[in-house]
Amino acid sequence: MSAPATRGRGTTVTTATPADTGSLEGWDDFVRAHPAGDVAQLSGWARVRAEAGMTSLLVLAHRDGRLAGGAQVLVRRVPVLGAIGYVAYGPLVDVGEECAGPVATALADELAALARSRFRMLFVQPPSGGAGAARALADRGFRPSDAGIAPRTSVRVDLARDEDELRRNLSRRLRPWVNRWPRAGVEVRIAGETDLPQVAALLAHTGEHHGYTSFGVEYLRGMYRELFPSGDLVVFLGEVAGRPAATAVYSATGGVLKTRLLGFDRDGEAARLNVPAAVDWTAMTWARSQGFRWFDHGGLSESAAEVLLSGGELDVDRLSGPDRHKLRFGGTPIRYPDPVELIASPLVRAAYDLSLRSGVGRVLVDRAKRLARTGPRRGTSPDRPVARKGAAMTASLLRTVGRPYAWAKRSANRALFDRRYGLDTDGVIQPGELGFDNPEYTRYAPAGLVTLRRLLPPGDVGPDDVFVDIGSGKGRVVLQAALRHPFRTVYGVELSERLHEVAVRNLASVRDRLRCQDVRLVHGNALEFDVPDDTSVVFLYNPFDGATFAQVVERILASVDRAPRRLRILYGNPREEAALLATGRVHPVRTLRGWRPGREWSRSNTFRVYEVV
């Protein structure tokens, strides 16, 4: 903790780190009791964000020995640029403090000093009722910001009303669903830790639809363990006939239940049965029963908020997208004080401002902001016309270069792998050409040259690990595993005699160059293959669908039941992911997406890593 600095008569300010546990406990109590308190200001949230590479500082103001205000600053280091700080819904000042002005001034002084001494940029989104803090920051060199570190507008539902009134305030099309959901088999419940793999999968569906990579199950697990026991987080899961269909993650701070993450399966019955709305309605009525004052939808577009705050009206049922979903519950729009920023370096500030004057620059800055806040994500912001235009131009370009790209990739594969080792692993062969008439069997197409290394770095493999490639084809992945990884044994299982014979010839060509010498190629049906009880990695590049896939998964899990151990499943083009997760025995831990033009082609080159539990 830094030495206390006196900022005005009777007010001292200190800057604490996560190691100062005594200060953190007092601060967490302060945030939870504050009517504008937000989970983003809790120390538990800082520990969650540490899993995404962030650190934190805590600026605390005391007056006459009593905690009177503060702000948690999340920090991310960006290569080349340096440290960037974010204050989401802070600083907070004690609403009962008679000298709130001096406390806000003292906090503004300290934040300005930090911005000039520790950060390249510091962005602040003041909380509800934080106009005084915003003015104090502006007086110290902060300027209006478009960084968008947190939503500046949202919509809230007043939970002081009884449930009948809440129902009457629903839109005319949503209101009848309250009675339909039970008859349609829709049930919503509070999710537990064992449900998090299904929650992560639903969030991933929504993330893929909107063009970003959602947080994985391990991140959700960390969030749950940090915030659920203290009552600062709750997760609801909506199911149709027992099958997960929609989910929402809410924070619960300052008397407000606030939406943080939403996800649902657009390919299932979730959309037809309005399951996301069922999740929010159930969470809303639960929050009312628990004594919460407000239900906050966690954001609203600036355009919709502007119309409503100016006294205009919107036909909610004619809207589309997230605004339609949120406004159907009859809430009231709110606007937080305008965000501010301080970029101390004139050179960095000039470069930042210059970049915002061009469409390309704005897109790049948006991506840099997202990278700094949350790590790499795909796509562009759907709220910016320039970003939409850029995304359309990019899609058009990718469609144009798709065929030349595929040809170039195959040529590189042949040159870098097949020709180098004298092999034949390339090509695409349809099931009919291999003599298969089972519609559940898929074509032969080899995985990329660096796929296995990226999914499973050699350093993550030990001398006791055993690798099994089910649907090994001509043996490309089998040989990559044996050439580069220290596996004890590598298996390749292939039904096609034609492909198996090619794999045998390929193995003979590189036998003396293998790092793992125990390579076993099995010609047979995966449904009859007994997965060895020492297998630690299973590779599946979408070899089959439907019942065949489900039965093979049963055989994999049976092996773990016979000999409990750690087992990872590497699944490419995971079309049967829902069936895999439905076993309740696996959870996704990592997603790898290759560069491909078009959503379908991109999905076909997606690989996910799962852990068997």
Image: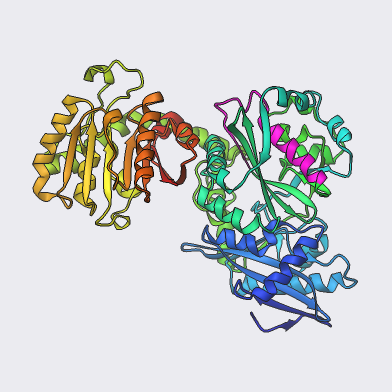
Q: Is residue 439 visible?
A: yes
The N terminus lies in quadrant: bottom right
Q: Is residue 11 above or below residue 339?
A: below
Give 223 or 444, whichever is nearer the viewer: 223
Q: Is residue 291 above or below residue 179?
A: below
On the image, the x and y values in percent for residue 306 come to 79, 40
Question: Residue at the location (77% across, 75% down)?
Answer: 106
Q: The magenta stretch spans which residues?
A: 262-289
Does the magenta-highlighted stretch encompass residue 276? yes
Splitting the image into 4 quarters, where does residue 229 fall? Answer: bottom right
Q: Is residue 511 above or below residue 73?
A: above
On the image, the x and y values in percent for residue 321 come to 66, 32
On the image, the x and y values in percent for residue 162 come to 89, 38
Give 610 or 122, whichever is nearer the viewer: 610
Splitting the image into 4 quarters, where does residue 222 fall? Answer: bottom right
Q: Would residue 566 be found to the left or right of residue 135 on screen?
A: left
Question: Residue at the location (16% across, 39% down)?
Answer: 418
Q: Is residue 435 above or below residue 496?
A: above
Does the magenta-highlighted stretch encompass residue 223? no
On the image, the x and y values in percent for residue 433 come to 23, 18
Q: Would residue 101 be found to the left or right of residue 203 on screen?
A: right
